[in-house]
Image (cartoon, rainbow, N blue to C red):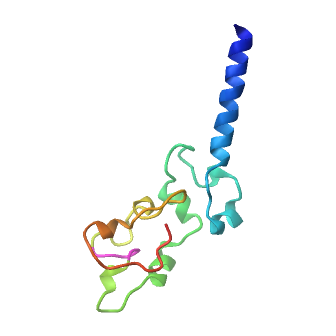
Amino acid sequence: MSKLKAVLALTFGCLLTLSAQAVEIRDHHKEVIGKDCKACHDNGIKQFPSDQACLQCHDVDDLAEQTARSEEDKWQNPHNNLHYGKELPCQECHSEHGSKKPLCSNCHTFKYDKHKE
């Protein structure tokens, strides 16, 4: 019986390792963090990263400047908008391991052509 438990434990451990390695990481993040998942997943591997984890590398003021719109459309800036200012949680629009529509597209029809999920 103990051999069966050992084999099951080893099999389960291998499956967990394979599933963790199968997760895609975007190229721009591979260069910075490599395979250290905890660099971003500061709340635990099974949890979304906190905004503080994102903001260690990404400056919200720089992002707001990069995504600024014309004066007429200035509140359509995803990183400095009418509803949330600069306080919208990163995970509402961005997902490292999948695709996600920007939160604003739930109600608005304008597009973010350079959106990186």
Please identify the residue farthest to the left as the structure is shown. 107
Out of 27 and 45, give the one closest to the viewer. Answer: 27
Name the image quarter holding residue 88.
bottom left
In the image, the segment drawn in magenta is 78-82
Name the image quarter holding residue 26.
bottom right
Out of 49 and 7, give the one closest to the viewer. Answer: 7
**Residue 15 placed where, x, y %?**
66, 35
Label total for image: 0
Q: Is residue 116 above or below residue 21?
A: below
Please identify the residue farthest to the bottom as the structure is shown. 71
Identity of the residue drawn at 36% across and 92% down: 70
**Residue 43 placed where, x, y %?**
53, 46
Q: Is residue 41 above or below residue 76?
A: above
Left or right: 5 with respect to 52? right
Please identify the residue farthest to the top as the structure is shown. 1
Out of 38 and 1, give the one closest to the viewer. Answer: 1
Q: Is residue 102 above or below residue 68?
A: above
**Residue 38 placed where, x, y %?**
63, 49
Identity of the residue drawn at 65% across and 28% down: 12
Identity of the residue drawn at 68% across and 39% down: 17
**Residue 64 placed where, x, y %?**
44, 79
Out of 40 and 4, give the one closest to the viewer. Answer: 4
Residue 81 lies in the magenta-colored region = yes
Q: Quadrant of the N terminus?
A: top right
Name the image quarter holding residue 25.
bottom right
Identity of the residue drawn at 32% across and 70% down: 105
